[in-house]
Amino acid sequence: VVSTPTNFTDASQNTPTSWSWDFGDNTTSALQNPTHVYTAAGTYTVTLISCNCVGCDTLTQVVTVIQSGVNLCTTNQSTSNVGAFFDSGGSANTYSDNENCSFLINPGCVANLVLTFSQFDIETNYDFLYVYDGLNTAAPLVYSGTGNILPPVLTSASGAFYIVFTSDFSVVRPGFAASWNATAITAPPVAAC
């Protein structure tokens, strides 16, 4: 999670005596078990080089850092490649009556954008969540939900999702939570005739 300390643990064998960590965000550490704080959401390649009197060995792993969940009703958009959102009640409370909230996920220039729900429980036939594959409600509707059946994993064809949540004047439920992950395009297009 962005701005949260992340502990890295060396599990090297054969008694290393030096360590070189590269956290993938232009920061490094020579500690055996460092703590690092990422300042932006994204996917980072972390490299550990551990050495002893015989030589060195390298281990590389990819870590994904997400924004802490954003409230769909107080934040209107994100351009991050990874993140999470929830209803106005957050992870511990119910959402409110008479809500009409929208949230745009638009990381720009991505190969795919995937939306995964981890919680879904809204008042059946009175409160609704809509997901559009694009920048607004004029885009294709790819999901319309009510009740407590977890939505399927959704993949955007456009590279953006526009989410709308509405609740009526009575009865509230625990709500919903979801996360997204996008793969950035790293090469220019290749023209073909």
Image (cartoon, grey):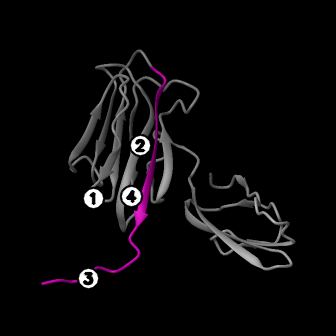
Q: Secondary structure at mark 3?
A: loop
Residue position marked by numbered label 1 in the rendering: 158
The C terminus sits in image quarter: bottom left
- The Cα–Cα distance between marks 2 and 3, rounded to whole angstroms, is 31 Å
Residue indicated by mark 3: 190
Labels 2 & 3 near each other (Cβ < 8 A):
no
Q: Residue beneath label 2, please? A: 116
> As drawn, is 131 to the left or to the right of 87?
left
Mark 2 or mark 1: which is in front? 2
Q: Which residues are magenta?
A: 173-193
State how many labels appear. 4
Q: Which mark is residue 106?
A: 4
Residue 70: x and y in percent read 53, 44
Q: From mark 4 to mark 1, how far is it between C-alphas? A: 9 Å
| Mark toward the start of the polypeptide (4 vs 1) | 4
Secondary structure at numbered mark 2: strand
